[in-house]
Structure formats: C-alpha cells, structure tokens
Image: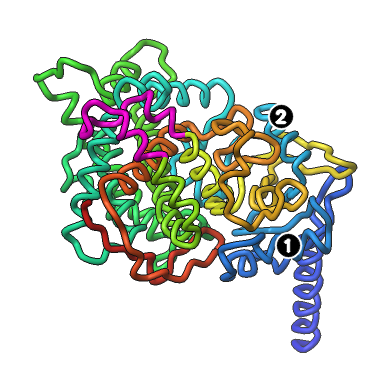
Amino acid sequence: MWNIIAAGIVGLLVVVITHWVYRWRNPKCKGVLPPGSMGLPLIGETLQYFSKSPYDGIPPFIAQRTAKYGTLFKTSLVGQPIVISTDPEINYYVFQQEDKYFQCSYTKSAVELSGKKGLMGNGGSAHKYLRNLVLSLTGPDKLKTKLVSEVDIITREHLHRWTTQGEVEVKDASEIMLFIFIAGKILGMNEQEALTLRGHYKAFVKGFLSFPINLPGTAFHSGLQGRKSAVKMIKDVFEKRRSSKEKENEQDFIDHLLQEIDKEDTFITEDTAVDLIFFVIFAAHETTSSTMTLLFKYLTEHPDVLKQLKEEHENIIKFREDKDAPISWVEYKSMTYTHRVVNETVRLANIAPGIFRKVLKDVEIKGYTIPEGWTMVVCSPSVHLDENMYDNPLEFNPSRWKDEELHGASKRFMAFGGGNRMCVGADLSKMQTTLFIHYLMTSFRFNVTNKGNIIRQPYLNFNDGICIQVNEN
C-alpha cells in the first residue's frame, strides 16, 4: 500500500518537474519567440555569460550564439528572460521606440541596488524630469562655465600626487580622483568623507549584476549592505543641509533638489532624490576610470598615436600667453585628435556588455514576438567590433574618426547609449578623459611598469592592475 502511494507521489513529482522544465525551456508567447536556449531552470545561461573571456573581440557567449541562432536570440540571465540583439537595425529600432515598446532598465538586482525611484527605474516624463535635473549639474552650459576649470584643478592635483606614490595602479587611482570630484560636486563632501562613501560603493558594485538573492555571503546581499550605508551618508547630507542656518551665496545641486522637493505637487521626493544621487555618483566614476586605464595600454602599444597627441597638446601650450594657465573651453574644444582617441578607446573598450531595455508590451521584430515583461539587450560590442561597420575593427586607430561625428550616437556607435536615453554624463566623462590626457602630454611623463591582465566577465576586469610611474616634466 505505502509502496503504491510513494510511487504515486514520485510519479506526480516527475510530472510536475517535467512540466516545469518544459515551461522554462518553452516560455509562453503569443507569437514566435526568437531562437535560442533558456539554459538550466532558474540559472539559465548565467554561468556561461559570466565566464572569463579575453577583453578584446566580441565576447564568446555572444559570438557563439550569433553564429548558431542569428542576430536576435533568446536566453536567460540572472533569473530573467532576455532577448539579445547584435543587429544594428534592430538596435536602432529599440532606441527609437523608447517609452512606446521599451523602457530603460537593467537586471532586477541592478535596479534594486541602484534605486527604483531614480534614473534607472523611471521612464517617460518622470525620466525626462530627472534627466533635466542632472543636466543642471553636467549640461553643456555648466561644462563651459564651471566644470572645465574644476576638472582642470583636480586632474592636476591628483597627477601631482601620483608622482609621489611610486607605482600607481591606474584603475584604483583614477577611480579615487573621479569619486572625490563627484562626491564633492554633488554632496559637498571633503576628501575623507568621499573615500568613506567610496568604500560602500565598492560593495555595491560587486552585486550590481548578480542573482537577486538576499542571503548572507551573496554578492547581492553585500551590494544591499553597501547601498544601505551609502544611502545613510547621502541622507545625512540632506538632513544637515536642511537644518543648516547658514546659506551659501551660490546654490549647489543639493539646494536645487531640496527646493524641488519642497514645491507643491512635485514629482520628486527625498527618496527619489537620494536614488538619483546614488546612481549618478556610481555612473560618474566607474566607467570613466576604465577608459582612463585602457588609455595607457593603447598609447604604449601605439607610439605613433602618442606622438600625435603630444604634438596637439604642445601646440596648445605654445600659443598661450600664460603657459601655466588652466585649460580654457576654447582650447578643450580644439583638441580634435584627442577627441578621436577618446572615441576609439571607448569603442574598443566596450565597458558595458550591453544596453538593457524592459519590454513594455508585446513587440514584433523581424517576424519574432518579444513578450511584455522580458528584457531586451542591445549588444554594443557586436556593433563596435563588426567588420561591416569598421575596417579592421580590432585595430586601435583614432584616425578612423576623422570624418565622423565625435559627440553623438549612431547605428554604429553607442558607447554612451542611444535614442533619448543617451548617457546624461557622457560629455563630462569625455571632458575628464581629455583633460587627463592633456596634462599627461604636457606636464607629466609616465612609464607603464605592469601591463596587467585584462579580462571580460562580462564587465572589464583589470586583474593585477595596469600600473605606471609618473614624473613631472
């Protein structure tokens, strides 16, 4: 009797599990899903996606599936059903249909860690409103009137520090420079406060793209703890500013946010403002420091590029009345070859493995249906390294940008996003990198002491670090 019952239970479990596995591998769809594999239940193809690969070239995960399934394929990563596009035309369509079929998003873990009420968690008019708030800090007018001189000061200061530190690990040192700048600019923090805040962000970054499992020991749990500590510091700044009786002569970003919060019928709350600041600080230091680090690899390997950079920047100094004057806006805009070097660096770097969009409603693309609630990933590396888009795409060649638009996005260049969701800090990032190059070419000299070991996992990972020694001229 008990044997029969046990056999029945086992049989039922087999049926349930078999059905569950079948449904996992064959998700519901009102049309035809793109080809591909959903991988193992729950895990999907996450392990393959996160496996180590060479930093240059199209990641094997993408290349292998594109060869097998075509330029549009389904998969599952960190517990989410995903469709990946390596097709420039599809990518362009996705960007053009922002807020109609697609909305800027990321994985569940990234959105929860970054803040659901900030830039990453909002679309439509709410996103536009928050974006405009950030542009009041980093927009073209502020770049020209304030930021160019402020970036000039901190760049010179930190490069001078590097001359006293012996061997410098570039990713870490440039990250510190950028973090101190943005934490000071947004939150008015001194250097020590900024470095404490950075410690919390480092825990957050580790969990950014992870399974959203909040258990001690997981990357996601560590990320949540880092976020919690960082948010507390940001809220403390708000509280101090609200209670302060002393008012600055010139309003800063926090003052502006507090005014917006206090307006009647306002969209923004303090939690929204905190999420906005939290994400902007992350975005303003993590990727730019990777670009700065890769510069040393490319410049060391291409002395002809280094020579042209030196000539461009020495000519700027040559025609100045005051040789020690800070960089002016006109001088910055004149650094044409340097802008090409920056674009070529970010094209090859492919710092972000893809651009994520949430599917708002069922959408048909090239005969396939992508269901509402799925995530669409525009795979920028496949475009940037496509031989149909660029001659010798793996070659570092800044001159390829000679007749190209240097400050925008296109079907063939999306390092800073696309559509109406272009990275709000793109121009600041480019300016920081350009001024960094200027002083390396004119006031300092460097020697690479360790080339490091760069891998992709799927973000760039600078194992061992790229290390340099810096001396003043």
Disc 1: which residue: 63
Q: What stretch of residues is rendered in magenta?
A: 312-335
Circle 1 — which element? Answer: helix
- Type of the residue with mark 1: Ala
Query: How far apart are the two marked residues, 1 and 2, measured between alpha carbons?
Result: 26 Å
Residue 428: percent from left, percent from top = 41, 34
Q: Could you tell me if residue 459 is visible in this image?
A: yes
- Type of the residue with mark 2: Gln
Residue sticking out furthest to the left: 246
Residue 270: percent from left, percent from top = 33, 28
Based on the picture, tell me whether residue 46 belongs to the magenta stretch: no
Image-based side of 71 in relation to 437, left or right: right
In the picture shown, does residue 248 fall above or below 372?
Answer: above
Residue at 69%, 66% (x, y): give it: 41
Disc 2: which residue: 97
Rendered image: mark on residue 447: none
In the picture shown, does residue 243 fall above or below 417?
Answer: above
* Residue 136 in which image quadrant: top left
Residue at 81%, 62% (x, y): give it: 67
Residue sticking out furthest to the top: 264
- Tell us which disc is closer to us: 1 or 2: 1
Residue 30: percent from left, percent from top = 86, 43
Based on the picture, tell me whether residue 315 belongs to the magenta stretch: yes
| Residues at marks 1 and 2 touching, judged by CB atoms closer than 8 Å | no
Image-based side of 214 in relation to 373, left or right: left
Circle 2 — which element? Answer: loop
Q: Earlier in the sequence, mark 1 or mark 2?
A: 1
* Residue 321 in which image quadrant: top left
Q: Nearer the viewer, residue 341 or 128?
A: 341
